[in-house]
Image: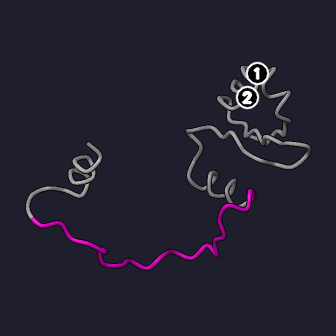
Amino acid sequence: MGQISVNIRELKSRLSHYLRLTKAGESVVITERGTPIGRIVPSAAPAEERLTAMMQAGLVLWNKQKLKSMPPVAKVRGKRTVADILIEDRG
């Protein structure tokens, strides 16, 4: 599995080709005038690979230490879940 770089014009004209490469496990970096602006990555990529891709893109910084567990920030009263409340609020 590797990484391919492509400009916007090429991506638009050969999108099916680059999507096939992505399905095969390749990451596609989209560039505009030589500057990376986005990335297409396989959805089934392992979490470690996705994290590495995000670190390479400068989206995250990580010192590779595990996070300490923390108590919940909020508690829900009653039998409803937080998801139930969010769904109700969106409706």
**Residue 55 percent across, percent down from the top left:** 70, 61
Residue closer to the observer: 54 or 7: 7
Q: Which residue is mark 2?
A: 21
Residue sitting farthest toward the right: 34
The stretch drawn in magenta includes residue 81: no
Left or right, 86 with respect to 17, comes to left
Q: Identify the disc placed on residue 17.
A: 1
Residue found at x 79% / y 40%:
30
Question: Are the residues flagged by discs 2 and 1 in contact, CB closer than 8 Å?
Answer: yes
Q: Is residue 4 above or below residue 19?
A: below
Q: Residues within 10 Å of mark 2 (few under 14, many from 20)?
A: some
Quadrant holding the N terminus: top right
Residue 21 place in picture, x, y as percent: 73, 28
Comparing labels 2 and 1, the label whose residue is closer to the camera? 1
Question: Does 36 sit left or right of 23 as displayed?
Answer: right
What x and y, as percent, mark residue 53? 69, 53
- Which residue is farthest left? 78
Q: Is residue 1 above or below residue 9?
A: below
The secondary structure that most of the magenta stretch takes on is loop
| Residue 23 % position (x, y) | 65, 29
What's the magenta region?
Answer: 56-77
- Say which quarter of the image contains residue 81: bottom left
* In the image, residue 68 lies in the stretch drawn in magenta: yes
Q: Amino acid at mark 1?
A: His
> What residue appears at the point 57 percent right and 38 percent down from the top-left corner?
43
Q: Secondary structure at mark 1?
A: helix
- Label drawn at residue 42: none
Q: How many angstroms separate mark 2 from mark 1 (CA)?
A: 6 Å
Residue 90 in the image: above or below residue 61: above
Q: From the image, which quarter does the C terminus lie in?
A: top left
